[in-house]
Each structure stands twice: as C-alpha cells, then as structure tokens.
Image (spheres, rainbow, N blue to C red):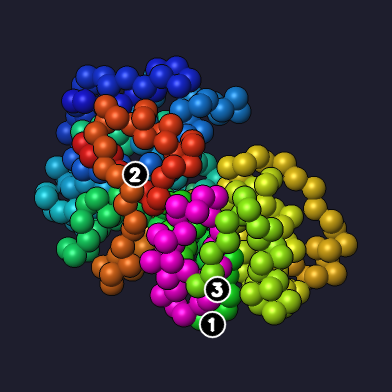
Amino acid sequence: MRALTLVADRQLVVADLPAPPAPGPGEVQIRVGAVGLNHIDVWGYRGMAFVKRKLPIVVGAEAAGEIAAVGEGVTRFKVGQKVAMYGAQTCGHCKPCQEGRDNLCENVGGLIGFHVDGFARELMNMPERLVIPVPDQVSVRDAACAPIAFSTVQHMLFDNAKLQPGETVLVHAGGSGIGTAAILMAKAIGCTVITTVGDDSKIEGVKKLGADHVINYRTDRFEHECRKITKKKGVDVVFEHVGADTFNGSLLSMKRGGRLVTCGSTSGPTTTINLMQLFQQQYKIFGSFGATIRNIEESLAKMANGILPVIDTEVTIEDVEVALKRMESRQVFGKIIVRL
Ligand SMILES: [Zn+2]
C-alpha cells in the first residue's frame, strides 16, 4: 500500500509499505480517505529537536475514512461505515482516560503522525475505542477536519474558556484552519467576533464566515482596535495560537476577568508577562492541547448541522510538500486536505 513517509527533516517520500494484517480482537481496519493538514505537520516536517521518534515515519495526524474490516468482538462498526480517528495512542485505563479526558492520558503512546506512524496511508488498524462514527450527512473530506481542527477549537472555546452566547471573542489568525472554525463556532452561538488577519486578501473571506470586525495585525495595533470596538471594556475571551508576536497584546485586549485560551505559538514559544497585570486584572489563562473523543463527536454533530470546515485546497500525497510550504508561508485560507 502507498504511504507518505518522512525520511529526514524536510524530506517526504511516497513509499510502498506492506498492508496491515487482519484487525485483531477489538480492532478495526480503516481505509483512510482524507487527511487534514495542521500546524503540527509543519513542526514534524521541519524536525523538532525535542521530539523522540524514529525515522522514517508515516505522516498525517488527522484523518477520516471508512471501515474496511472488523476484528473479533467489535460491535459498534460495520464494513463501509464512515469514521474519524482519534489522534493519539491513549491507554484507555488511566484515570483521565476513564473520565473521557484522553488528552490528559498518563500513559500516552504518542501522537499519531508525529511520534508514531500516522494516517497518510491506504490502510491501518486502530483500537475500536479510538474510532468515532461519522454521521451520514458529513463527507469523509469534512470529517477529516474533526479530530484536530474542529475538536481543538471545541475544547478551547467551550470546555476551557466556557464561551457564552452574546460574549465578545477575539480570534487570532482568522484565516487559519482553526481560526476559520473558531469564527464559525462562536458566531453559531451568537457571539461578537473580532478577528485578526496578516494579509488584506483574507479580510473578505473572514467576513463571509461571519466575523463582525477584522483587523490586519501587520498594519494596525489589534489591542487598540479591540478596546475601541468594545468601547474600552475589552473582550471576554481571546483565542490564541500565534504566541510571541501577539500574546501581550492579547492580554491587553481583555476585560477584567477575561479568559485567554491558547493552543499554539506559531510565531515563537517565549514571551514575558506582567504578573501585576495578570492578578490585578484577574485574567484566566488556559493552556489547551488536543481534544477529547467527546469533542470529536461534538464537532461531527456540528458539521451535520451545517457548520462545515473551510477547505482551502485538496491535494494528492505527492503534493503534500508543496502544501506544507504554503502553510509555513501562511498563504492558506482554511484547511488543506490530502486525498488518498
Ligand atoms: Zn490513559
């Protein structure tokens, strides 16, 4: 079977690998249909000094497909059924896993497509527990945006920041894969959305998604604009993933008692913060990584109700390298999907 493998930093090769054996007890075999690209794929492609992994590794961290075969004892799935897959090898036994908080698993075997072989291959076996049914109305292409992009946003906005209808939220990089999803989900519950873009060509696109105010952070100070728009009060929630370039401005954009939730640091991982500002303003700062299986179910339910991911392009596995370079240069609006 064909698989996309990373053989060295910045070197992807389409390889011919042996197909997996028949699924074992409690396992399903999945024919992967679509893989969603995320910033974590860019990290993996560049090579991250702190990541323990053996190369070559099959890439692809987020995917959907259909059931090709079921192992002994599997009752939740039938051959041909559409499914999405959880993106980490969690144990299922520790306290967080038992409580449905797989992203806090104490014995995690690694992130799929980052530490261990990923989804960019024709067939793979997975434990039934880590596989999620996709509603009939949702395409495999769209479902491939549920396990990371949509569910990360769901976890950030609703589990961590507890975003409420009517609140004002600042969404950074509104044209990115998670930024587009955050705008759609916040608008769907009646929030006011302020979003930043790094390029005027993205303004029209984020407005079409429902953003109420758009700020080009390269030409305007977004923290000043946020205070103007909110009549000096500040926003209730900031959706952060840009990091060093925006973090302090994000704090200054918030009202007293505001909540900042972050899942990334694409512009750099280090910043300093003013602790007096932190406690006097009573800010709440949430680090968020990954999502739970329930978040993926919630994301797929939102898609079934018409909140669909914004797709930038669909590419073949031969073109993933070009696609990752476009992501690095931030010339993407929404998600890039790899078709297998
Ligand atoms: Zn666990």
* Above or below 187: residue 99: above
Secondary element at image label 3: loop
Residue at the disc numbered 1: 166
When asked about the image quadrant of residue 304, the answer is bottom left
The boundaries of the magenta stretch are 187-211
The one nearer the camera, 325 or 91, is 325
In this orientation, does residue 295 appear?
Answer: no
Secondary element at image label 2: strand
Residue at the disc numbered 3: 163
Q: Provide residue 159's location: percent of width, then percent of height.
A: 53, 67
Residue at the disc numbered 2: 336
The one nearer the camera, 25 or 153, is 153
In the picture as drawn, the residue positioned furthest to the bottom comes out as: 166
* Above or below 71: residue 306: below
Q: Is residue 226 left or right of residue 82?
A: right
Q: Is 329 inside the magenta-drawn segment?
A: no
Q: Which quadrant is home to the C terminus?
A: top left
Q: Residues within 10 Å of mark 3 (few under 14, many from 20)?
A: many
What residue is at 65 percent from the left and 39 percent from the top? 268
What residue is at 74 percent from the left and 55 percent from the top? 248
Q: Mark 3 or mark 1: which is in front?
A: 1
Q: Are marks 3 and 1 in contact (CB under 8 Å)?
A: no
Q: Earlier in the sequence, mark 2 or mark 3?
A: 3
In the picture as drawn, the residue positioned furthest to the right comes out as: 276
What residue is at 33 percent from the left and 48 percent from the top? 312
* Above or below 294: residue 10: above
* Above or below 126: residue 158: below
Q: Is 198 inside the magenta-drawn segment?
A: yes
Q: Which quadrant is home to the N terminus?
A: top left
